[in-house]
Amino acid sequence: MHARMTRYEGAAPEAIDETLQTKKGVLPTEFGQTEGTQGAVFLIDRQSGTVVIISLWHDEEAMRASEDDATRVREEVTGSGEPASVERYEVALLRVEHAGEIG
């Protein structure tokens, strides 16, 4: 399993809320339609305006195949002055007590 971690900095709290509301019902469908996806985790820090998205992929090939779409999404959600960084990892251990949507 592999993971791509995307980090956005400097988002306004209202922009975070708007994005979460807009994407809440759409993201599971989007991830479900992307071959090789295993799930995603969205982490937010409203005070700093930081959003971290960790997407999980069946293997490195599936993650790499999604790069063009991921780049397009990053360009859509970042405004000027809101940089995004991307890191890619092999998942060494994953344990989830409860799978499903929170909130």
Image (cartoon, helix red, strand yellow):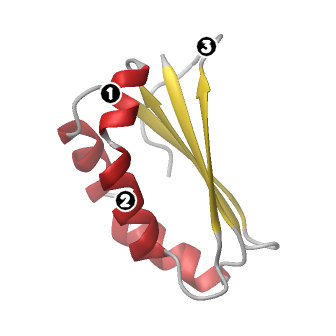
Residue that mark 2 sits on: 24
Q: From mark 3 to mark 1, how far is it between C-alphas? A: 21 Å
Q: Position of residue 79 (x, y in %)?
A: 54, 85
Q: Nearer the viewer, residue 22 or 32?
A: 32
Residue that mark 1 sits on: 62
Placement of 30 over or under 96, stated as above or below: below
Given this view, does label 3 or label 1 mark the residue nearer the observer?
Answer: 1
Which residue is found at the position 35% from the left and 64% from the top? 72
Q: Position of residue 31 (x, y in %)?
A: 29, 42
In the image, 78: left or right of 43? left
Judging from the image, what secondary structure is the residue with disc 1 in?
helix
Which residue is found at the position 35% from the left and 71% from the top? 22
Tell me which numbered mark, 3 or 1, is placed earlier along the sequence: 1
Placement of 37 over or under 91, stated as above or below: below
Which residue is found at the position 50% from the left and 44% from the top? 102
Judging from the image, what secondary structure is the residue with disc 3 in?
loop
Which residue is found at the position 50% from the left and 52% from the top? 103
Residue that mark 3 sits on: 95
Q: Amino acid at mark 1?
A: Ala
In the image, 16: left or right of 48? left
Q: Nearer the viewer, residue 10 or 101?
A: 10
Q: Position of residue 58 (x, y in %)?
A: 37, 19
Name the outermost residue toward the right. 47
Q: From mark 3 to mark 2, how far is it between C-alphas? A: 23 Å
